[in-house]
Amino acid sequence: MPAFRPLPNGGRLGPAAVRSWWPKGAEGEPASAKDAVLLARTPHLVLDGATAAAAALGACRVVAYVPEHLVPGVRRAVAERARHGLDPVPIEVVGAPSAFLAGQEAAVVSALNGGPPMPTFQGLVPIRRRGVQGRPTLVHNVETLAHLALVARFGAAWFRQVGTERAPGTVLLTVSGRSPSPVVIETPLGSRAGEVLGLSNEEATQYAGALVGGYGGTWVPIEAMVDLELSPEGARRHDAVLGPGVVVLLGKRTCPLAEVARVVRFLEAQSAGQCGPCIHGVAGLAATLGALAWAPATLRRGPEELVELASLVEGRGACRHPDGVARFVTSACEVFADEVARHLRTGLCPLAAAPGTLPLPRPLARPAGVAW
Amino acid sequence: MRRRVFRLLVDPIACDGHGMCAELFPERIALDRFGYPVFSDQPVSPDLLPLARRATTMCPQLALHLVEANASGGAGR
């Protein structure tokens, strides 16, 4: 939720509101580091935001739900605040398991209620009405809280000095593929991606494509990426979402279809395995992509099977995991259409055996009988 | 007074793909290739509501629901 949106229910939230944040960084979204950077470098800014939101809503509980390796640092910051009596509501710190979906809103609530850290069905009663301990609950992520703290400190006019009319403020991006290691960049919303990434039209030709919004995001042709406006609206013009603010530039020394296949295999493994269409559909996508990347001759149906499976999983889960996988796969089919055609025509890709470059946690489980 | 309008909603975690709903309410519910129900989220017309109700009450998992068409909710991120 962007920082400039009013808090839900105009502050009429019930007595127990819990702010939590997504355990991103290396744990959740493998290519994202912005939340870890904020929590490690400016924990007080994030906690200021949590306290401001709690005060605005009259919340009686504040929980920081952060990756295990960041817990000691956040605990230290909370103790410093307690010594100075900064927070009207004490902040609890809870370690989050390292799973892709553990930071999903309903999964956070489930974990804090003592259940498994997995999404639950929200269709009948949303967690903003019944969440932790059965009470209205607000889940915000780290970056939103940091923005909120700055709005509280410097005011709305200050916040609106940068960004666009409809999307004021800045956004944190984790950029991979442009430099030897990923970097986190803060940039005004509405910036041109080419400027932020230091990418001219000529330099762009050394890349095969750009991924916007992480592994639940959208592949964008590299020529279009240079001029992409980094804002929700600008991303939407390319059927993309900024999502967790992940931007990955994919080089040309690797097979894009093998890269995509590896990521979808990871996404399949990270599914909570609760909803039928996601279990079967994402498995089908992973298998079809694997065949397309490494054994195209075995395929009976090509990209049309991927598009059909993607439409079959979209909107059919309790969480948005399958929607993200569908977006990732269908956009890959479009942006790498030439590669798909070449694989189907020649049957063998000289780059398919090249090591993967898209960030994935190691070790990656290898299902038996699958060529990686 | 505004007439209440209903649409179908499935709890995809509870649904095990028994397929009873598609048998009982083929007017609106079909099964995908894996055996899980697919239907439009448009309102169920009043003449079909009895069939829809029967499908929801006969679901072995009680995964199928009739909810007010303007009710909010939906999947979180």
Image (tube, coloured by chain):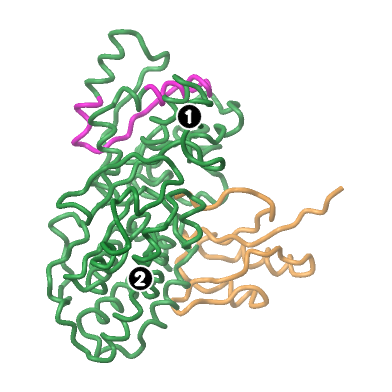
Chain colours: A green, B orange
Judge depth for marks 2 and 1 and give the one in front.
1
Above or below residue A166? Residue A218 is: below
Q: Is residue A217 left or right of residue A358?
A: right
Magenta stretch bounds? A48-74
Q: Is residue B23 magenta?
A: no
As measured in the structure, the alpha-carbon distance from the residue carrying label 2 to the one carrying label 1 is 36 Å
- Precedes in sequence: disc 2 or disc 1: 1
Q: Label 1: which residue?
A: A159
Q: Is residue A211 left or right of residue A52?
A: left
Q: Is residue A63 magenta?
A: yes
Please report, as a chain letter, where disc 2 is located: A
The spot of residue A197 in percent (x, y) is: 30, 51
Please report, as a chain letter, where disc 1 is located: A
* Most foreground residue, B18 or A364: A364
> Which residue: 12% across, 67% down?
A355
* Most foreground residue, A294 or A132: A294
Crowding around mark 1 (Cα neighbors within 10 Å: few <14, some 14 to 19, many 20+) is many
Q: For mark 2, give the secondary structure.
A: helix
* Callout 2 touching callout 1 (CB < 8 Å): no
> Which residue: 62% across, 48% down?
B72
The spot of residue A116 in percent (x, y) is: 33, 46
> Which residue: 35% across, 41% down?
A172
Same chain, labels 2 and 1: yes
Above or below residue A368? Residue A164 is: above
> Which residue: 65% across, 55% down?
B67
Residue most extreme to the top: A84
Above or below residue A270? Residue A117 is: above
